[in-house]
Image: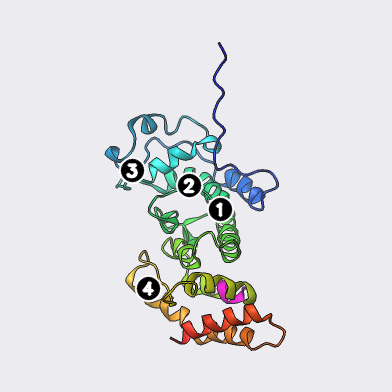
Amino acid sequence: MKREEAMPLEAKLPPDHEFAELIAEAYQVFACEKPTDTGVCDCCMDRKIRKHFFDPDIEAMPLHYLQDWYFGDTGTEFTQHTWRYLLPRVLEVLASGETLSGIGVEVSLKRFPTGVRENWKRNEWSVLDRFQRMYLHRAAIDKEDELDGVLCMFGIAGWPLASLFDQVLEMPPQILAERLWSDWCRFNTPGVWVGAFWSKKQEAEVYSFYRSRELLQRMSDLAFDPQTPPELADKALAVAAVIEG
């Protein structure tokens, strides 16, 4: 009788992936002993998955284990140790383009204040900071997730909004115009979109940035630059019109 072949492990990065080197570093710098508790509500996880959750090495944790774990509410037993242990695999799944939570990409990093620099050792923060910048840059190009959703993922996890906004403004205007047109202007009713996962205070700051003079100027300059291709100029102009409201 033939032995049944093992299913390939999902959400693993090939060696030539743009995030592969950084994720390999993440596994090194966040390496720690396996936790003794998942840190989430007992009734929310599949019992078999919960029982065997920590059996595989973290590099080999099945994607569906993590996805099931995200169904559970974090309780008082959830610690930074648990998050530190899971974090390299969480980052790898995100880098692979797979989904962790059925709720949305926005909640992927908020179970512990991941973006608060003081919570991490220098080498740990170096990995997190580079991941954030690379992921946000990719989000502007790939159009897999809306830019607001990715900004929200980092913002509600503790990354300073001012830094995130600066990174957006530093993006090439051509890329930014394509991204924002896709997010705001390709529907029947164009408009600035702010997601529901932001806190009330953050929502006001984000909306203010999306309607800011700096962002408007970037789009206007691109739209009226004679070197801008006509189709892109039209998109930049449409985005500028939405920003002006």
Label 2 vs label 4, nearer the camera: 4
Mark closest to the chain's N terminus, 1 or 3: 3
Q: Which residue is mark 1?
A: 124
Label 1 sits on a secondary structure element that is helix
Q: Which residue is mark 4?
A: 203
Q: Which residue is mark 3?
A: 40
Question: 149 or 186, which lies in front?
Answer: 186
Give the spatial CA distance, label 1 vs label 3.
24 Å
Q: Which mark is residue 84?
A: 2
Crowd class of label 4 (few under 14; some 14 to 19; many from 20; radius 10 Å) = some
Label 2 with label 4: CB-CB less than 8 Å: no
Mark closest to the chain's N terminus, 2 or 4: 2
99 sits left or right of 12 in the view: left
User: Residue 157's spot in the image, x, y percent?
Assistant: 43, 60
Direction left: furthest residue: 43
Give the spatial CA distance, label 1 vs label 2.
9 Å
Label 4 vs label 3, nearer the camera: 4
Q: Which residues are magenta?
A: 167-172
Say what amino acid the circle numbered 2 marks. Arg
Is residue 171 within the magenta segment?
A: yes
Measuring 42% from the left and 33% from the top, which residue is drawn there?
A: 53
Label 1 vs label 3, nearer the camera: 3
Vertical relation: 117 (above or below) 229: above
Say what amino acid the circle numbered 4 marks. Glu
Vertical relation: 29 (above or below) 233: above
Label 1 with label 2: CB-CB less than 8 Å: yes
Say what amino acid the circle numbered 3 marks. Val
